[in-house]
């Protein structure tokens, strides 16, 4: 009788242990619901990679932790949740948990992050630009604070290929800009100072209509953005100027949402954010030449055929030298906000360290 009782207790204990073992995974399962969004469409590389690289890579690494974590994503690109004028506030306020922040339209809230905009004509290699931007956001406290002050956590820098002119009429010389209304997003309009052109604020999502309706007569923009938005249809004259690639913002996460994540998931988000940034640089460099060629081909038979011409070295040099000292003006304007002068010097030194020979040494004119 005693043996039977002992056996029964053992069986009951075993059954209880098995039941507990089966219950543990369910108890450990923790699902995080996150929204990732952008004002711009996935046709643009910095948005497309959010969906094709960032989301699946984060999922894979979270699953590999084997801790029962799972992320349920809601993806909302192409302005489904907000437009280009709300990329910062939408992440800041939690309209989206993760989003692409276009800081060139946010000079008032992120003044120190504009260091690339006030130092044009450096390099056409966006991979170098993004490498430096990521490094500076990690190591320059004043830049980190700008993201944090706006309730955001920086994940990875975004940038664009070199800037050119896209216009209704030919703009072969620097003097041709005088009196023209030229669209440019936010602080990029500064590049027209000294030219006599009139900057018109806008973005890739507004250029087509603005040029078509006469709000502007062209734009300073990027080939990889002009192509998918078909802006070459209304601005068929492409003048390659090589104003330079540019750091334009970053993918960021709402700080409150970020702090709800376990530390190991936070690390994954940061790590994959940097890999997203690197992949973006590689993608842009591959797509750039193809974008110019494609526009010339598909626009060959439109009413005004696409024509791609290069601004001469002498005319480009006039633009470089005629432009006011944007960096010095910016340093003066931001003297009370942080180490603007040091940021320019750090950036220019980082460029030269990587073998870049800027057309203008902005830091030496401060």
Image (spheres, grey):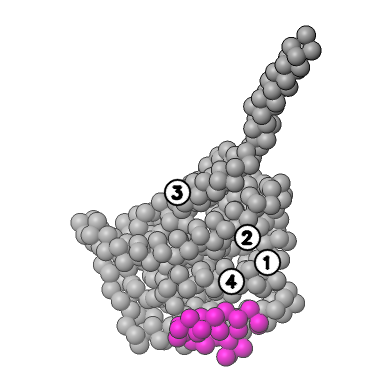
Which of pointers 4 and 2 lies earlier in the amino acid sequence?
Answer: 4
User: Which residue corresponds to mark 1?
Assistant: 144
Q: Which mark is residue 135?
A: 4
Q: Which mark is residue 52?
A: 3
Q: What whole-number distance in Å separates the C-alpha atoms at marks 4 and 2?
A: 12 Å
Residue ranking furthest to the top: 1
Residue ranking furthest to the bottom: 364
User: Which residue corresponds to mark 2?
Assistant: 154
Q: What whole-number distance in Å separates the C-alpha atoms at marks 3 and 1?
A: 27 Å
Looking at the picture, tell me which residue is in the foreground, 136 or 215: 136
Q: Is residue 72 left or right of residue 161?
A: right
Q: Which mark is residue 211?
A: none
Of helix, strand and loop, which one carries label 2?
strand
Q: What whole-number distance in Å separates the C-alpha atoms at marks 3 and 4?
A: 24 Å
Region in magenta: 341-366
* Image location (x, y in percent) of residue 155: 59, 58
Looking at the picture, tell me which residue is in the foreground, 274 or 147: 274
The crowding category of the residue bearing disc 4, from other C-alpha atoms within 10 Å (few below 14, some 14 to 19, many at least 20), is: some
Residue at 56% x, 70% y is 133
Residue at 43% x, 56% y is 45
Of helix, strand and loop, which one carries label 1?
helix
Q: Is residue 45 above or below residue 67?
A: below
């Amino acid at each position: 009788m005693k043996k039977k009782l002992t056996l029964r207790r053992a069986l009951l204990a075993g059954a209880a242990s098995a039941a507990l073992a089966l219950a543990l995974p369910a108890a450990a399962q923790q699902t995080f619901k996150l929204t990732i969004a952008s004002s711009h469409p996935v046709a643009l590389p910095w948005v497309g990679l959010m969906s094709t690289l960032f989301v699946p890579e984060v999922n894979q690494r979270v699953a590999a932790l084997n801790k029962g974590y799972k992320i349920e994503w809601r993806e909302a690109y192409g302005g489904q949740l907000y437009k280009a004028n709300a990329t910062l506030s939408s992440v800041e306020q939690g309209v989206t948990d993760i989003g692409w922040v276009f800081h060139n339209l946010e000079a008032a809230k992120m003044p120190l992050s504009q260091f690339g905009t006030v130092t044009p004509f450096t390099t056409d290699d966006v991979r170098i630009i993004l490498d430096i931007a990521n490094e500076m956001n990690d190591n320059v406290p004043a830049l980190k604070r700008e993201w944090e002050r706006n309730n955001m956590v920086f994940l990875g820098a975004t940038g664009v290929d070199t800037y050119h002119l896209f216009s209704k009429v030919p703009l072969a010389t620097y003097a041709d800009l005088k009196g023209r209304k030229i669209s440019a997003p936010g602080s990029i309009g500064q590049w027209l100072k000294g030219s006599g052109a009139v900057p018109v604020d806008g973005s890739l999502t507004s250029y087509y209509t603005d040029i078509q309706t006469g709000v502007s007569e062209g734009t300073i923009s990027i080939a990889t953005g002009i192509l998918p938005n078909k802006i070459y249809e209304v601005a068929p004259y492409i003048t390659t100027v090589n104003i330079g690639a540019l750091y334009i913002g970053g993918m960021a996460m709402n700080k409150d949402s970020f702090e709800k994540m376990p530390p190991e998931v936070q690390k994954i988000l940061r790590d994959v954010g940097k890999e997203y940034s690197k992949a973006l640089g590689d993608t842009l460099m591959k797509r750039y030449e193809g974008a110019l060629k494609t526009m010339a081909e598909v626009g060959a038979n439109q009413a005004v055929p696409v024509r791609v011409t290069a601004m001469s070295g002498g005319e480009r040099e006039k633009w470089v030298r005629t432009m006011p000292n944007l960096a010095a003006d910016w340093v003066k304007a931001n003297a009370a906000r942080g180490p603007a002068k040091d940021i320019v010097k750090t950036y220019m030194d980082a460029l030269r360290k990587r073998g870049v020979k800027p057309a203008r040494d902005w830091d030496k004119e401060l």
